[in-house]
Amino acid sequence: MRVRDLPLDDLMEIRVKLIIQCKDEVIPKILYSSLKPDNIDLPKGLNIDMSLNGRFLVVDFSSIDRLETLISTIDDLLTCCQASLNTLKEIEQLNRTK
């Protein structure tokens, strides 16, 4: 029996809240903008909601019976976050040398 064939009462919903605290209010906005395009066309049963709260980027994940997909998605988001932060760091360094 496949997950989609199970009655809704038998499904497990998994929720994860990721809160990223930054040193100022600009960086969460940049991260939000850089991550937003990746959060479309998600697999069925997976949902991502992002919001800004001052120096925090809040990411709420939920998944129905797809723990592996959820873990992979969180890992991907964190990898993209790190790439964005590394790019920001490189830009700051370049601007200092001018």
Image (tube, rainbow, N blue to C red):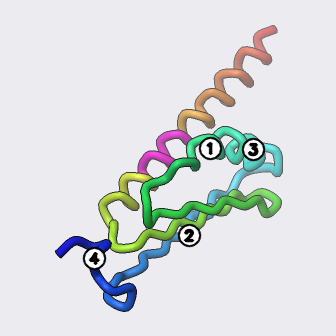
For marks 2 and 3, give the CA distance.
Answer: 19 Å
For marks 4 and 1, give the CA distance.
Answer: 33 Å
Magenta-colored span: 75-80
Q: Can you identify the residue that label 4 sits on? A: 5
Question: Within the image, what quadrant is residue 26 found in?
Answer: top right
Of the residues shown, which amino acid type is indicated by label 1?
A: Leu
Q: Is residue 33 above or below residue 42?
A: above
- Whether residue 54 appears in magenta in the rendering, the answer is no
User: What secondary structure is the magenta-colored segment mainly?
Assistant: helix
Residue 69 point in image, percent of width and height: 35, 58
Q: Is residue 44 left or right of residue 31?
A: left
Of the residues shown, which amino acid type is indicated by label 2?
A: Lys
Question: Within the image, what quadrant is residue 96 found in?
Answer: top right
Q: Residue at x 79, y 17 (%)?
A: 95
Q: Mark 1–mark 2 contact, CB under 8 Å?
A: no
* Circle nearer the viewer, 4 or 1: 4
For marks 3 and 1, give the CA distance.
Answer: 12 Å
Of the residues shown, which amino acid type is indicated by label 3?
A: Ile
Mark number displayed over residue 35: 1
Of the residues shown, which amino acid type is indicated by label 4?
A: Asp
Q: Can you identify the residue that label 2 sits on? A: 17
The image quadrant where one finds the C terminus is top right
SS state under label 3: helix
